Image: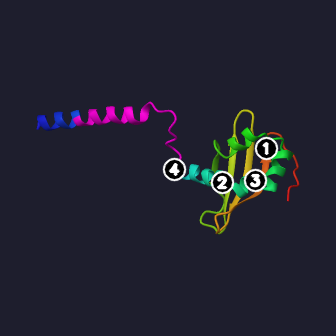
């Protein structure tokens, strides 16, 4: 019985060391990309029609956002579903830092096309009329 425990613990320790060397030291790997929130943000980022839309450019100009702030909104932010299981899906993408507090409402239709509904800067409210 003692021998089994010792063999088990030895194998477990070897496994921990291997996992550490495979995943622990590599900072270039983005291992959380497959969480549901990150998948939604990745779908939005990869939608070239959405990222080059006139409405997004209008909100970006109205809110005085540079390209890095916009990419930060669709990379480092959190999101929640406004109508779970709905058709079309609606997401609220929000980023809150010391300098920024941005919200964007995005709709995903059945063709997997994303449409920007609205975008707000809650820290510096601006009335944008982008249609």
For disc 4, the marked residue is 34
Decide: marks 4, 2 in contact (CB < 8 A)?
Answer: no
Q: Residue at point 73% right, 51% down?
A: 104
Q: Where is residue 53 in the image (x, y as percent from the top left)?
A: 77, 56
Residue 104 lies in the magenta-colored region = no
Q: Is residue 24 above or below residue 44?
A: above
Magenta span: 11-33
Q: Identify the mark nearer the N-term, 2 or 1.
A: 2
Q: In which quarter of the image is residue 70?
A: top right
Indicate the secondary structure of the residue bearing disc 4: loop
For disc 1, the marked residue is 122
Q: Position of residue 82 (x, y in %)?
A: 66, 59
Q: Nearer the viewer, mark 1 or mark 4?
A: 4
Q: Identify the mark nearer the N-term, 1 or 4.
A: 4
Q: Residue at point 75% right, 53% down?
A: 52
Q: Quadrant of the N terminus?
A: top left
Q: In which quarter of the image is the C terminus?
A: bottom right
Q: Which of marks 3 and 1 is in front?
A: 3
Q: Is residue 122 above or below residue 24?
A: below
For disc 3, the marked residue is 52
The CA distance from mark 3 to mark 1 is 24 Å
Q: Nearer the viewer, mark 2 or mark 3?
A: 3
Indicate the secondary structure of the residue bearing disc 1: loop
The CA distance from mark 4 to mark 2 is 14 Å
Q: Where is residue 77 in the image (x, y as percent from the top left)?
A: 65, 44
Q: Position of residue 95 (x, y in %)?
A: 69, 43
Local packing at callout 4 (Cα closer than 10 Å; few below 14, some 14-19, many 20+) is few
Decide: marks 3, 4 in contact (CB < 8 A)?
Answer: no
The CA distance from mark 2 to mark 1 is 21 Å
Q: Residue at point 79% right, 48% down?
A: 120
Decide: marks 3, 1 in contact (CB < 8 A)?
Answer: no
For disc 2, the marked residue is 44
């Amino acid at each position: 019985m003692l021998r089994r425990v010792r063999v088990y613990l030895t194998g477990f320790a070897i496994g921990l060391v291997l996992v550490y060397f495979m995943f622990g030291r590599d900072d270039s790997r983005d291992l959380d990309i497959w969480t549901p929130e990150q998948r939604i943000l990745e779908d939005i980022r990869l939608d070239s029609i959405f990222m080059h839309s006139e409405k997004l450019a209008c909100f970006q100009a109205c809110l005085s956002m540079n390209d890095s702030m916009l990419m930060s909104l669709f990379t480092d932010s959190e999101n929640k579903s406004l109508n779970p299981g709905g058709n079309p899906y609606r997401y609220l993408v929000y980023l809150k830092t010391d300098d920024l507090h941005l919200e964007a409402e995005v709709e995903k239709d059945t063709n997997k096309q994303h449409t920007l509904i609205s975008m707000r800067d809650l820290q510096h409210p601006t009335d944008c009329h982008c249609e």
